[in-house]
Amino acid sequence: MCYTQSTESFEPYFLIHQCSNHQRDYSLIEATGVFKSYGKQSVLEDISFSLEEGKVLGVFGPNGAGKTTLLKILALLFKPDHGNVHINGLDAGQHAQAIRPLIGYVPQEVALYEDLSVADNLLCWSRGRRVSKEDAVYMRIASALDIHDLARKKVRTLSGGMKRRVNLAVALMNAPHILIMDEPLVGVDLVQRQTVLEHLKELAAQGVTQIITSHYPGELLSFVDQVMILDNGKVQRYEHSQTLIKNNGQNQMTNLDNVIFDIVQGKGE
């Protein structure tokens, strides 16, 4: 049995929410003074940043830096202990129901029905859109992420990398205006990584705002616009990717890995 959620209307795939058709005097995503703790353990401390519509933010840092917790707060799965998050001008704490349809979330863990086929998973997670296997939305996503050949296979028979692609496809079924991805490329082979990245670039070109984490930031250099470096729950850097590299004495061809390592180790500017 699959979970569905009824909604009154859904936009065609890749179309941006109508709020984008007029100018706004605020950023699409704004976080101000966000704190989060688990018991006595502080996970996020005074996180503040803004992200413009259509931009891609890469969130990087060592294990335990707070990346996953931050993404879950932005995806409205967790509430901050203190501070505020505004999305599309709305306070996330007060207007979560109105904001959630704008967001597609790819969790770090695979969130699929193991005993259902790939196709049935996509249909089940489409929030009651009654999408069929012949639906243009389904066909476009399956083609873009190269999962057509997997359609009839049970999820439990797939490799970890294949499951990751299906995990991403699920998040795209509802044409999100904001796509939040926690380590979506883990276990995906080199060829399919490029397939996924090319599709994410196409989404960015069409105005889909994206936030992504990865333990391999270098491969995202040509993709992300902004870089946030987290360490011990604090923002160490938040700036344009090329500015970050330039300020740390690296050239355009240098990937972000060494720069981020130096900053976390206290060697960066």
Image (cartoon, rainbow, N blue to C red):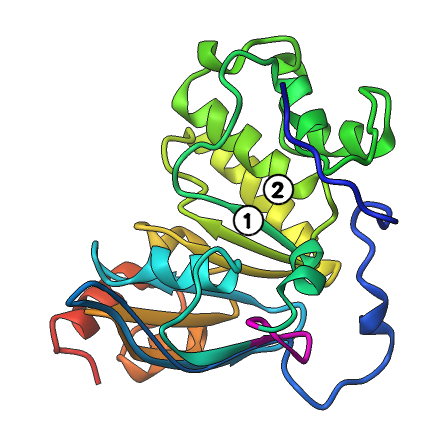
Residue stretch in magenta: 86-93
Q: Which residue is mark 2?
A: 171
Height in image: 75 above or below 122? Answer: below
Residue found at x 81% / y 35%? 137
- Residue 181 in the image: x percent, y percent? 49, 50
Q: In this rendering, would 246 be left or right of 12?
A: left
Residue found at x 86% / y 80%? 22
Q: Quadrant of residue 18?
A: bottom right
Query: Is disc 2 in contact with disc 1, using a CB cutoff of under 8 Å?
Result: yes
- Residue 230 in the image: x percent, y percent? 28, 69
Q: Residues within 10 Å of mark 1 (few under 14, many from 20)?
A: many
Q: Quadrant where the C terminus lies?
A: bottom left
Q: Amino acid at mark 2?
A: Ala
Q: CA distance from mark 2 to mark 1?
A: 6 Å
Q: Quadrant of residue 99?
A: bottom right
Label 1 SS:
strand
- Residue 24 in the image: x percent, y percent? 76, 85
Q: In this rendering, would 254 be left or right of 63?
A: right
Q: In this rendering, would 41 be left or right of 61?
A: left
Q: Nearer the viewer, residue 2 or 122?
A: 2
Q: Quadrant of residue 29?
A: bottom right
Q: Residues within 10 Å of mark 2 (few under 14, many from 20)?
A: many
Q: Which residue is mark 1?
A: 105
Q: Amino acid at mark 1?
A: Tyr
Q: Is residue 211 visible?
A: yes
